Image: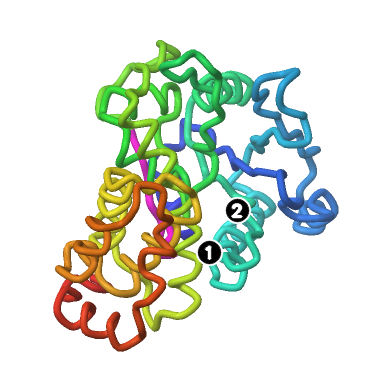
Amino acid sequence: MAEAVARYAQQHPQRHCYLLTDPTLRDFMPGLGERYAAYGGTDALAPVQVPLAPGLIDKSHWPTLLALHLQTAAGSALLAMSCEAAMEDWAPQSQRQSDGHRVGGWLFSQAPAGRIAAHLASRCVQQRVAGQRTLVRYYDPSVLDMAWNVIVQEQRDALLGPIDCWFIAGRERQPRSYARVHGGIGDAGFPALSRGQWLELGHIRPFNRAWARITASAKELPGPVLCRQVAQALSRAYGYGFENPEDLEEFAWRAFSVSPRFDQHPSIARLIRERMADDAFGYVIADLKDEDWSVIAMEYGEEKME
């Protein structure tokens, strides 16, 4: 991870590197200033907060940007420590405990930190079709990596704006980067999210909760193909009428652990078709035994764990 970020910095020396952190659940790194000085840092660390909906969201929940001077030993040490923290937060134990993600990524831009902070604040608070303002946590890698597949290219470019490249530690614990396709994008407005896009964004939380469960029990991490198939399965679940977050999490868990097409198996399709309108998904499948799921996995599980 650190090598990929450092390599990009070497190739683009004119761009600043900003570490994006989220203090919502815990400090990024207690005693950061002292550790920075111990590595030879002589300048004072000056984090810049991302002002998310002032007056509505408490400042203690605002993400922060910290300039990393990667040409110095202290800056390189902070990069290494932040990469280590980002990887730790994807570990199964951290996922099970819902510890959150301390590191939102490493952002490269020629713009000053204040402009980047203001830009992110404008992008993370969006207005729904009905008018209400909603926080979209793009600064959380478990949200950004899913949301990127929901939004279209024009929205991606507008999300990045003055950010030339945004690195995150992906859920497969490999570096992932997002860059504009069209250059010269400033702070133009963000094209409104459609109702369908809001619906898909709402599926990210149950997807991530199911992800935490599967990574705690699976021998290998689900690949990007399976992740996309599970996201599609959640859209089908909503189409069936399952809107409760617990139902959607259980649906995603079965898509991960059995087959992303498990709902299309004749036995499951019949149960869904014959259920009462207000029956929860957990109730619908309550009578299925382990051997039933094994049969479904054997017959429909050819994509499993791809």
Point 59% across, 62% down: residue: 89
Q: Mark 2 points at which residue?
A: 101
Q: Is mark 1 on a helix, strand or loop?
A: loop
Image location (x, y in percent) of residue 17: 54, 38
Q: Is mark 2 on a helix, strand or loop?
A: loop
Residue 137 x/y as whole percent: 54, 37
Depth check: 223 or 1 in front? 223
Query: Residue 182, percent across and down?
Result: 26, 23
Against 181, residue 265 (above or below) is below
Disc 1 and disc 2: Cα gap in Å? 8 Å
Indicate the amino acid at tag 2: His
Q: In the rendered view, would you say 261 is above or below 55?
A: below
Q: Is residue 113 visible?
A: yes
Based on the displayed image, in which of its 4 quarters is residue 290 positioned?
Answer: bottom left
Toward the viewer: 15 or 101?
101
Q: Residue 90 carries which label?
A: 1
**How is the structure coloured here?**
rainbow
Residue under the image location 85 percent in, 53 percent down = 34
Instruction: Classify mark 1: residues with Cα within 10 Å, few (<14), some (14-19) or many (20+).
Output: many
Disc 1 and disc 2 in contact, CB within 8 angstroms: yes
Q: Which residue is drawn at 21% across and 78% down?
A: 296
Residue 13's mark? none
Residues shaded magenta = 171-179
Q: Is residue 10 visible from the viewing direction of this image?
A: no
**Split into 4 quadrants, where in the image is the C terminus?**
bottom left
Which quadrant of the figure has residue 180? top left
Image location (x, y in percent) of residue 177: 37, 46
Instruction: Left or right? Give the position of 140 relative to 51.
Output: left
- Earlier in the chain: of badge 1 and badge 2, it is 1
* Residue in front for this viewpoint, 173 or 273: 273
Position of 229 with respect to 12 (left or right) is: left
